[in-house]
Amino acid sequence: MEAILANADWGVIVILLPLTGGIVCFLWPAVSKTAGLITVAAVVLAVAGLGRQIMEHGAYRHTVGGWGAPLGIDLFADGLSLFMLIMTALVGLGISCYAKSYFNPRDAVWFWPVWLFLLAALNALFLAADIFNLYVTLELTGLAAVTLTALTGRIDALSSAMRYLLAMLAGSLAYLLGVALLYHDSGSVDIATLAQRIEPNATVWAALGLMSAGLALKTALFPLSFWLPPAHASAPAPVSALLSALVVKASFYILLRLWLELFADFAEGVSTLLGLLGAAAILWGSLQALRQTRIKLLVAYSTVAQIGYLFLVYPLASASSGLAAGIAAYLAFSHALAKSAMFLAAGNLMRFGGHDRIADLDRAVQRLPLTVSAFALAGVSIMGLPPSGGFTGKWLLLDAAMSQGRWDLAAVMIIGGLLAAGYIFKVLGYAFMQAKEPHDARAVPAGMEWAALLLAVGSILLGLMASEIFALIHPDLVANAGGAVERVWTA
Amino acid sequence: MSHAFAYALVGAGLFLLGLYALVAYAHLLRKILALNIMGSGVFLVLVALAKRTGDAEPDPVPHAMVITGIVVAVSATALALALMLKVSGKTGQAVLPGRHQD
């Protein structure tokens, strides 16, 4: 038994489990809720199995069907891939527990199969070893995400799903054209082989531009973020949480991977540009979030701002790219936990009051204490206050910016934190106040409140477990993270 | 200028033409067709660049990629058309409603 567990091809299982589960849910809608939850829980265990293998034997590589590169498809997982898989599995499990109580039977029939297909696509994406396989999985992720956005069939959801789909397809075609050019230049799509052969020339520069632009569009980097707020705000709450927490991280992961392995050495000018756009995203997204009168739009614009932080790692990566990747992955994880908790809490408030107008929250803090606590705890991480995951990630980023003399980026990060405090306290403030006219309130199932709270608690716990997590991605970060926490306690 | 390079240039031209139409036209069917033209441009580049070293035999790998790409493009187009029908069924016209406040 022990030997079977240690030698199983967990990478393949991690992809096949949700794929099979999705088909089962599709064929037998009556059992979809149970089958869906069991599948997601099983994926968590399979990811744990893969993690154990990677811890013991180093990076995982599997040649599907025995056909290796260049003809066949390889699966590959290192610390960074594993970290993204863990993020997807854990946040996905939290959102699934919420979705169990959220959907009415008519929508649940569609939610579960499509969500499991999305999970299979995300897992395959994080395990892909070549840039063409990344394209296919990216497209699968996008199609499943668009379908989930349109789930309710209301007109605002349909039109934002349509806009989302058009942006997704344009972004992936630009990426695919970049793949074609890189293949022409180097004769391979395998990332490891490309890394050995790549040399800066006109073709590679064109590929870099096309791939970066396409992936920036799919990650909603300002000013290509026009599609995100309507899509994330009009989708049902669990879907918004999946989109904001996981789907935007998929294209970000590809860009990070390409940058680390292929482009970092010669494209410093582009790194600077990505960093500047990230800084603009922080300011613009936060200011827009402050202006919103509806919670879901506020949270969606907050996602635009938080994506900006992820892009700040590019200009800071010159000192140590592994370090920057670790910070980016850690920030992505803490944002995934906090933002999913926020969207789920917003879904509870909408279920409770029948609307999501911030000014009419009407003493939600007394009537839905767990939900408001979830929103506040997630807010702590989004604002970057200790001891949350958001704090440790942003502190490391700030530390890197200051040690490289990038005071401009450091200032933007601090202003972004203050603006985040502004929009989060705006919601919390109204949650304490009585509305002018009293509202009828509908009951919110306890499972939905607890799911939101557990994800929010997770975003705080992530900050306390920083050293263990950084050991997984990048050993150098352990020292820095430990220092960050110590400096806070002594300050 | 080799034949292959000329085809690749035509492919890049189709990509740009499609991108222009995607942004310029409001009607959703035109946007979906524009995306298909962009896709065809990319496929043409892939096929043209397969013959890159002047060998007699072109490289088969990009052809396999194009087959996969066509499958993806067909599914994406099907989803886009279905969404377009839903949008036009609800609003009576196949255009996206006024831009969101962004």
Image: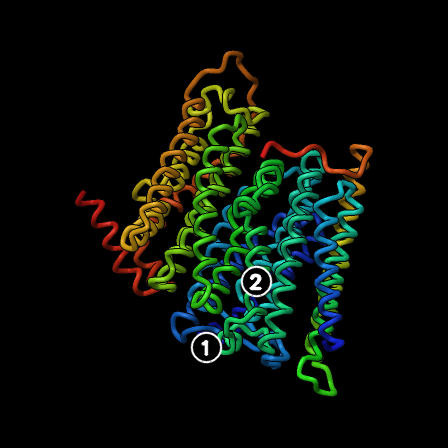
Camera-side residue of A344 and A277: A277
Taking the image as shown, residue A8 lies to the left or right of residue B29, namely left
Amino acid under label 2? Leu
Mark 1 crowd level (few <14, some 14–19, many ≥20, 10 Å Cα): few
Q: Position of residue A470 (x, y in %)?
A: 34, 60
Q: Position of residue B82 (x, y in %)?
A: 78, 47
Residue position for label 2? A125
In the depicted structure, whether residue A36 falls above or below residue A54: above
Instruction: Tell me which chain the residue with mark 1 is part of.
Output: A
Camera-side residue of B100 and B54: B54
Q: Quadrant of the C terminus of chain A?
A: top left
Residue at the image point whose x is 64% and y is 51% from the top: A168
Judged from the image, the secondary structure of the residue bearing numbered disc 2 is helix
Q: Position of residue A60 (x, y in %)?
A: 47, 73
Taking the image as shown, residue B44 lies to the left or right of residue A172, namely right
Query: Given this view, does label 2 or label 1 mark the residue nearer the observer?
Result: 2
The numbered dot on residue A3 is: 1
